[in-house]
Image: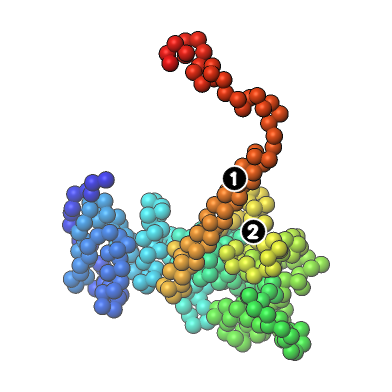
Amino acid sequence: MAAGPSVTAEVELSDPRSLTHLAGPGHNNLKSLEAELGVELGSRGNIVHLGGDADDVAFALRFFEQLDELATEGVRLDGHDHARAVHALREDHELHLRDIYSEVILNNARGRPIKARGLAQKMYLRALKAHDLTFGIGPAGTGKTYLAMAMAVQALLAKKVRRIILTRPAVEAGERLGFLPGDLEEKVNPYLRPLYDALDDMMSHDKVDGLIKRGQIEVAPLAFMRGRTLNDCFVILDEAQNSTSEQMRMFLTRLGYESRCVVTGDVTQVDLPGSATSGLAEATHLLGDIEGIAICRFTEVDVVRHPLVQRIVVAYEKRDADKRAAQERGVELKRAGRDATERMATPNPNPEDDIETVDDLLGTGDEAEEV
């Protein structure tokens, strides 16, 4: 396909400081944006110069103009957000970046806003608001659990729910930890520590401790949910890929009146014994078409941790895809070999059919004349 005509353009940013922030140390962000946008970028003062294919330049202009509008509203994206913003604009031509980045769920314990950092996260937040049961599925670092907990804390502080219940399966990640000393709480705390860490990031430790002591926040292993009815709660099941089919069924049927439930996990990181079925994979297959249930899926594009995490996720997903392809080829070869063996072992009930006559070889009638 031939490239379009080469054009140049420029966009003037409202605040010269915006360009300094946008470019990053050593203009590294601009270099990354050149690759993402497919254009050449330069800067002078508060003006960004663009050059390249007409369509690419037009798209880049749209990106920088919307970025500048966000900056005038006090919303600044860092270098890691730029790639997700570009991806979001390519996915939805009607989208404005303000639709993603302007809404704040709440400010964390350090006063920093917690909000969506990409299109997938924005759609996830919409699903959490609109549905009583939401599944968030995708690789580590995509904000599935963190955003769900932020929504839960916001709902609790706004008195929309009476309690937050956070739960996880107590499954070891590929290693046997053996006997753990202490009482029951001390035994299960190591499995639940990530949930406490997220709470401490959103509120002061003293506030979290007070809410836990008053029973307004409960952190417990999944096994402790059996027999309960969870009314007026915001319930989050984390690491749900490590729940069994029976545990998932038990958990989902605990949901009571005026409650919301979020189930998060990564179906590529199952730590269950080989013969056990992941309750998360089964539930999303069974419940995907039920009204009132949302299933949100994240990919490596949505990873918001260190940039290396995204590349690590891609590498492992490629490995897994290669394994699946090799297994499928092995199954096909085995099936073909089995079919061939069965044909050879089964005698033909009409052996005369296997004998070719002269007529069979030369044809009959007109066909024979042609030969």
Can you give x and y, in whole percent of width and height, for residue 26 in the image? 26, 78
Say if residue 330 shows up in the picture.
yes
- Name the residue that disc number 1 marks: 336
Type of amino acid under label 2: Ala
Q: Is residue 153 left or right of residue 225?
A: left
Badge 2: few (under 14), some or many (20 or more) residues near its Cα, within 10 Å?
many
Quarter of the C terminus within the rendering: top left
Choose top left, top right, bottom left or bottom right for residue 117. Answer: bottom left
Q: Position of residue 113 (x, y in %)?
A: 47, 74
Q: Is residue 161 above or below residue 294?
A: below
Return the residue at label 2.
281
Mark 1 or mark 2, earlier in chain: 2
Asked whether residue 259 appears in the rendered view, the answer is no
Q: Residue at x 64, y 48 (%)?
A: 289
Q: What x and y, as percent, mark residue 279?
A: 69, 61
In terms of secondary structure, where does tag 1 sit? Answer: helix
Apparent side of residue 6 relative to residue 210 in the rendered image (left or right): left
Q: Quadrant of the N terminus?
A: top left
Q: Nearer the viewer, mark 1 or mark 2?
A: 1
Within 10 angstroms of label 1, few (less than 14), some, or many (20 or more) residues? few
Determine the residue positioned at 40% across, 63% down.
Answer: 84
Could you tell me which residue is drawn at 51 percent across and 71 percent down?
141
Judged from this view, the residue extending furthest toward the front is: 358
